[in-house]
Amino acid sequence: MSTLPHRVTLVDVGPRDGLQNEKQPVATEHKARLVSMLQDAGLKNIEVTSFVSPKWVPQMGDNTAVMAALERHPGVRYSVLTPNMKGLEAALPTKPDEIVVFGAASEAFSQKNINCSVAESIERFAPVVEAAHAAGLKVRGALSCALGCPYEGEISPDQVERVVQLMKDIGVDHLGVADTIGVGTPRRVQAAMERALKHYPLHEVSGHFHDTYGQALSNIYACLEMGIHTFDASVAGLGGCPYAKGATGNVATEDVVFLLNGLGISTGIDLDKLVDAGAYISEQLGRPPVSRVARALLAKRQG
Ligand SMILES: CC(C)(COP(=O)([O-])OP(=O)([O-])OC[C@H]1O[C@@H](n2cnc3c(N)ncnc32)[C@H](O)[C@@H]1OP(=O)([O-])[O-])[C@@H](O)C(=O)NCCC(=O)NCCSC(=O)C[C@@](C)(O)CC(=O)[O-]
């Protein structure tokens, strides 16, 4: 039996990835309150918003206001997405602790998501990384469609490694392997992770799994077996497109914490308070949490 890590770091991406697809505006105060509740639950890493075009992602148009409304806790790292210099320049005055550049293993997804080829995206990211480092910020790189692409189908480990290498070359500090459409299964995830680990140390590689096909927890376990100990997750399982049949969000943070608690792996997160945070934002959105653990615990509370 393999030895699993003793401690795992979870990055809650709910305020950003979770809410970016919501069709109805979510009030800035609810977003800030969600961040507060997540940090009260013990989350030390929270992806708050993104500095992207409001024409592309209207829901993140209040990025500066959300950052201003945060009640920051010492020891909590607040990250934001910045796809280009314009985004970074807007983000810097709001004082994030780290920034995220986001590329893709698939050419088609790169075009659809950020309107440029993979090579062009790297050219755009290079000055962002340099300026972020000059400002003393850590840079995480998200690699979308690392297991599959909605336009190109299956993505090979070679395609993953090509972009991992490009990210490394421009100085990206951390590499997040993202299964954007949730089609990965454990052995394929391990093969993709192996390529990331050829260029980044264990503590600078993370997994970002969407649960569309119900594989996310298995994939996280497969990563734990490799010693990977940083994962993105989204409170209440927020995310995905509510109007696209079958689409779902990120793996729910509550579900990941329940799994890790069961494995005796510490996260520093209070599951009850996390469930409260998920219930709060779900109430604002007018629907129950997607997290199965949250649903079970909320039902148990009601007797
Ligand atoms: C990247 C761009 C901006 C390129 O968009 P573009 O149209 O190619 O950019 P451009 O430089 O030609 O500028 C066009 C207009 O956008 C403005 N603009 C340009 N940059 C910015 C900026 N930073 N902030 C605000 N405005 C900006 C710019 O000022 C101009 O405004 P106009 O003159 O037309 O009024 C666009 O494609 C975009 O915003 N895309 C949104 C991408 C996005 O947010 N996707 C979701 C996040 S990624 C994700 O969810 C995946 C992840 C990370 O979770 C992992 C996974 O699961 O896969």
Image (spheres, helix red, strand yellow):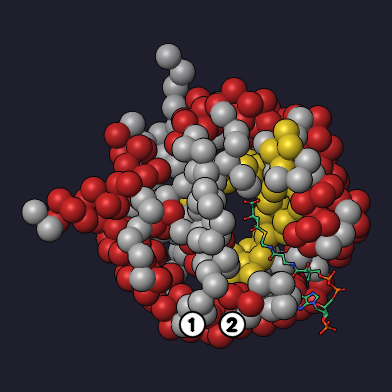
Residue extending furthest left? 303
Residue for badge 2: 62
Residue type marked 2: Asp
Disc 2 packing (10 Å; few <14; some 14–19; many ≥20): some
| Whether residue 47 is situated above or below residue 6 in the rendered picture | below
Q: What residue type is labelled 1?
A: Thr
Horizontally, residue 270 falls left or right of residue 18, namely left
Q: Real-space Cα distance between discs 2 and 1?
A: 7 Å
Q: Is residue 116 above or below residue 215?
A: below
Residue 264: image location, x then y, percent: 31, 33
Please say if the residues under marks 2 and 1 sit with CB atoms less than 8 Å apart.
yes
Mark yes or no: residue 256 visible: yes
Q: Counting residues from the N terminus, which is met first, the one under dot 2 or under dot 1?
A: 1
Residue 57 horizontal side relative to residue 168, left or right: left
Ligand 1 found in image quarter = bottom right
Query: Above or below — where is 103 with respect to 54?
Result: above
Quadrant of res 204: top right
Image quadrant holding the N terminus, namely: top left
Mark 1 close to ligand 1, CB under 8 Å: no
In this rendering, position of residue 257 left or right of residue 72: left
